[in-house]
Image (cartoon, rainbow, N blue to C red):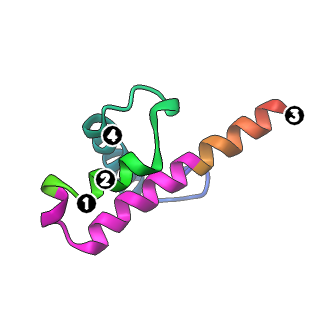
């Protein structure tokens, strides 16, 4: 987790807020709902068009990192 890696609370909140917004606006109800195409479409539409490329990238990085973390946790649980 971000906390376990020593990230400051401000960063943890920022990433959590970005992921919460992404999940809500994409209407993801579970991890099975998350699809790269949907995230990419969301990033290229609506209010995101008014965001800078850097900000859009932070959403993409948060999503990719979170999903990679989930896969890693699942793999560990299977051992």
Mark 3 or mark 1, earlier in chain: 1
Please provide percent x and percent y for residue 37: 41, 50
Report which quarter residue 53 is drawn in: bottom left
Find disc 3 in the rendering and name its residue: 79
Please tell me the numbered disc located at residue 20.
4
Question: Does the residue at mark 1 contact the one at mark 4 (Cβ under 8 Å)?
Answer: no
Please tell me the numbered disc located at residue 5.
none
CA gap between label 4 and label 3 equals 29 Å
25 w.r.t. 49: above or below: above
Q: Is residue 52 magenta?
A: yes
Report which quarter residue 48 is drawn in: bottom left
Mark 3 or mark 2, earlier in chain: 2
Magenta span? 48-67
Element marked by disc 3: loop
How packed is label 1: few (under 14 Cα within 10 Å), some, or many (20 or more)? Answer: some
CA gap between label 2 and label 1 equals 5 Å
Find disc 1 in the rendering and name its residue: 44
Question: Does the residue at mark 2 contact the one at mark 1 (Cβ under 8 Å)?
Answer: yes
How packed is label 2: few (under 14 Cα within 10 Å), some, or many (20 or more)? Answer: few
Nearer the observer: mark 3 or 1; the answer is: 1
Please provide percent x and percent y for residue 13: 35, 49
Q: Quadrant of the C terminus?
A: top right
Question: Does the residue at mark 3 contact the one at mark 1 (Cβ under 8 Å)?
Answer: no
Find disc 2 in the rendering and name its residue: 41
Q: Count the labels in the image.
A: 4
Mark 1 or mark 4, earlier in chain: 4
Please provide percent x and percent y for residue 18: 32, 50
CA gap between label 3 and label 1 equals 38 Å
Majority secondary structure of magenta residues = helix
Please provide percent x and percent y for residue 78: 82, 31
Name the outermost residue toward the top: 29
Element marked by disc 1: loop
């Amino acid at each position: 987790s971000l906390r376990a890696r020593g990230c400051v609370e401000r960063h943890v909140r920022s990433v959590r807020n970005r992921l919460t917004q992404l999940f809500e606006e994409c209407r993801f109800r579970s991890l099975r709902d998350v699809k790269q195409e949907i995230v990419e479409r969301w990033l290229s539409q609506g209010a995101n068009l008014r965001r800078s490329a850097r900000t859009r990238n932070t959403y993409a990085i948060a999503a990719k990192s979170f999903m990679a973390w989930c896969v890693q946790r699942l793999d560990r649980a299977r051992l």
